[in-house]
Amino acid sequence: MPVYTNKVVWKEGHIGHTSCGNGTEMGFSAPPSLYGHPRMMTPEDAYLMSINTCIHMMVLWAAKRFKLDLVAFECTAEGEVEEHLDKTSWFKKVLLRPKVVVRGATEGVVRRALQMARKYSTIAESVKSEITMEPEIEIRK
């Protein structure tokens, strides 16, 4: 069973540094609205990115499995945060808007591949947010 690691180190104020087991490193901060710094990765950004990038990798897997001639793929993720009276909050919903361009397939096959990508996404299956997709599919000859 794979094991992944991550380490965070406080630097100053609302700035930290993170390093992953695969060697990736970066600074991060709270969002500016929570005393953080602009143009830095935030935990909220990382949450959406983890879902979006995992789905992305699974779309590539599903495209191969379904023998799709993938021309282009991009996806925007939008998260809706719900705040409670006690000031706690969580991502209630995550909306993914994938744009998929393929050659020589049907829209139904592409939709099925997207469903499989969602089903087999480790990250999407690990979070409690409601995740929905609103795909835009283009079929080329």
Image (cartoon, helix red, strand yellow):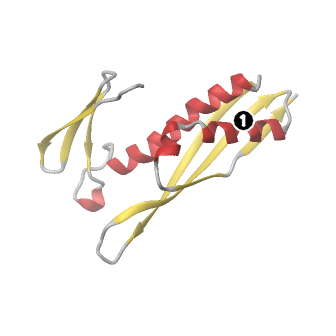
Relative to 123, 115 lies left or right: right
Considering every residue shown, the one lying at the far right of the view is: 141
At a point 26% along the width and 60% down the height, the residue shown is 34
Q: Nearer the viewer, residue 113 or 106?
A: 113
Considering every residue shown, the one lying at the far bottom of the view is: 85
Q: For the residue labelled by badge 1, is the local secondary structure a helix, a strand or a loop?
A: helix
Vertical position of residue 62 compared to residue 132: above or below: above
Vertical position of residue 130 compared to residue 5: above or below: below
The quadrant in which residue 85 appears is bottom left
The image shows residue 140 at horizontal and vertical percentages of 84, 31
The image shows residue 50 at horizontal and vertical percentages of 45, 40
Considering every residue shown, the one lying at the far front of the view is: 1
Q: Nearer the viewer, residue 117 or 125?
A: 125
Vertical position of residue 19 compared to residue 37: above or below: above
Mark 1: few/some/many CA within 10 Å (<14, 14-19, 20+): many
Relative to 66, 133 lies left or right: left
At a point 62% along the width and 41% down the height, the residue shown is 119
Q: Quadrant of the C terminus?
A: top right
Amino acid on which disc 1 is placed: Ala
At a point 30% along the width and 43% down the height, the residue shown is 40
Q: Which residue is mark 1?
A: 113
Q: Quadrant of the N terminus?
A: top left
Relative to 49, 67 lies left or right: right
Vertical position of residue 70 compared to residue 100: above or below: above
At a point 46% along the width and 49% down the height, the residue shown is 127
